[in-house]
């Protein structure tokens, strides 16, 4: 038996039924199949011009939160230097995106977003 074949056979040993289980019900852990298929909500974030901010640009390194429609936090993410973000989300649920920064208020989107949406978030300096 070659060395690589021997190592391969050793790797398979844990998969073989143990002699201790001969004639008994196998109580070892079974693989679990995920019941939910997750997706994402992604997009870009920009700061828009306001009375207190004459400049616009990407929301660089800003913490955004995905909340359910009741305002409960689901997950957080930080934008890239280009203002891009990506949230993991469940299908068939509605969410809102808000900024955790006390300096900004969310201008858009004003409604709910869903799994698979590509969103343009706009923030305004308070």
Image (tube, grey):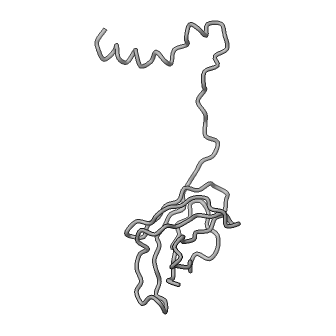
Tell me which residue sits at (65%, 7%) in the image: 23
Q: Quadrant of the N terminus?
A: top left
Q: Position of residue 106 (x, y in %)?
A: 56, 77
28 on left or right of 60 = right
Tell me which residue sits at (56%, 60%) in the image: 116
User: Please, which residue is most extreme toward the front here?
Assistant: 102
User: Please, which residue is most extreme toward the right here?
Assistant: 70
In this orientation, which residue lies closer to the viewer: 117 or 21? 21
Q: How many tags in the picture?
A: 0
Q: Is residue 63 above or below residue 123?
A: above
Q: Is residue 89 above or below residue 105?
A: above
Q: Position of residue 85 (x, y in %)?
A: 47, 64
Q: Position of residue 31 (x, y in %)?
A: 58, 30
Tell me which residue sits at (61%, 36%) in the image: 33
Q: Is residue 79 above or below residue 126?
A: above
User: Please, which residue is most extreme toward the left here?
Assistant: 2
Tell me which residue sits at (58%, 64%) in the image: 66
Residue 96 sits in which quadrant?
bottom right
């Amino acid at each position: 038996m070659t060395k690589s074949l021997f190592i391969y056979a050793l790797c398979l040993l844990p998969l073989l039924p143990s002699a201790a289980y001969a004639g008994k019900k196998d109580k070892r852990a079974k693989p679990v199949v995920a019941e939910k298929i997750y997706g994402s909500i992604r997009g870009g974030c920009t700061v828009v011009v306001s009375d207190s901010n004459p400049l616009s640009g990407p929301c660089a390194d800003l913490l955004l939160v995905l909340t359910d429609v009741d305002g409960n936090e689901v997950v957080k993410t930080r934008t890239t230097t280009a203002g891009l973000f990506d949230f993991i989300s469940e299908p068939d649920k509605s969410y809102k995106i808000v900024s955790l920064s006390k300096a900004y208020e969310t201008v858009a989107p004003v409604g709910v977003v869903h799994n698979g949406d590509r969103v343009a978030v706009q923030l305004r300096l308070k």
